[in-house]
Amino acid sequence: QVQLVESGGGLVQAGGSLRLSCAASGRTFSSYAMGWFRQAPEKEREFVAAISWSAGGTYYADSVKGRFTISRDNAKNTVYLQMNSLKPEDTAVYYCAASGYSRSYYYYYMSGYDYWGQGTQVTVSS
């Protein structure tokens, strides 16, 4: 069992930066790939970024590539999402999730994840 708690959301102006954190409970955190998804009002939840258990592989949605960076610290049971050059269209609730799959194919889909956090709101003003 893994419990996930996101933090770091807030209100920021366009062009600004935020860093989201996701703290995980449980001793097996390092065996899970981790992902970030987001859901804007009246839209479906979409993939943002993912990182393999060893941090050897990172994966991004085209819409955030070059602006967002995912990282993890297995010693702290925490995964991060550094978000730079934020745009109003990045406004959403951001969720972190844990995946027991080893193949990166699964990381792009909600069904590839076993555990989810409650989400943190990110609002980017124009």
Image (cartoon, rainbow, N blue to C red):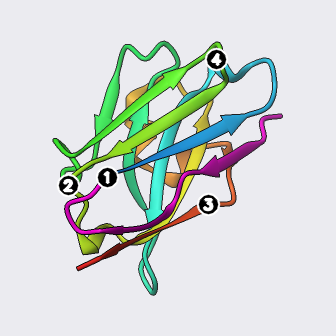
Residue at the spot of label 4: 31
Say what secondary structure mark 4 lies in.
helix
Sequence-wise, the earlier of marks 4 and 2 is 4
**Category of crowding for the residue at label 1, using alpha-carbon neighbours closer than 10 angstroms: few (below 14), some (14–19), many (at least 20):** some
Sequence-wise, the earlier of marks 1 and 3 is 1
| Residue 63 rendering spot, x and y as whole percentages | 20, 56
In this rendering, which labeled residue sits more in front, label 1 or label 4? 1
As measured in the structure, the alpha-carbon distance from the residue carrying label 1 to the one carrying label 4 is: 29 Å
| Residue 52 rendering spot, x and y as whole percentages | 46, 23
Q: Report the span colored magenta.
A: 1-16
- Given the image, on which type of amino acid does mark 1 rest? Ser
Sequence-wise, the earlier of marks 1 and 4 is 1
As measured in the structure, the alpha-carbon distance from the residue carrying label 2 to the one carrying label 3 is: 21 Å
Residue at the spot of label 3: 119
As measured in the structure, the alpha-carbon distance from the residue carrying label 4 to the one carrying label 3 is: 22 Å
Residue at the spot of label 2: 85
In this rendering, which labeled residue sits more in front, label 2 or label 3? 2
Q: Quadrant of residue 4?
A: top right
Q: In which quadrant of the rendered image does the N terminus lie?
A: top right
- Given the image, on which type of amino acid does mark 2 rest? Ser
Say what secondary structure mark 2 lies in.
loop
Say whether marks 2 and 1 touch (CB < 8 Å): yes
As measured in the structure, the alpha-carbon distance from the residue carrying label 4 to the one carrying label 2 is: 31 Å
In this rendering, which labeled residue sits more in front, label 4 or label 2? 2
As measured in the structure, the alpha-carbon distance from the residue carrying label 1 to the one carrying label 3 is: 18 Å
Location of residue 15 with respect to 51 vertically, above or below: below
**Category of crowding for the residue at label 3, using alpha-carbon neighbours closer than 10 angstroms: few (below 14), some (14–19), many (at least 20):** many
Q: In which quadrant of the rendered image does the C terminus lie?
A: bottom left
- Given the image, on which type of amino acid does mark 3 rest? Gly
Say whether marks 1 and 3 touch (CB < 8 Å): no
Q: Specify the label residue 17 is tagged with.
A: 1
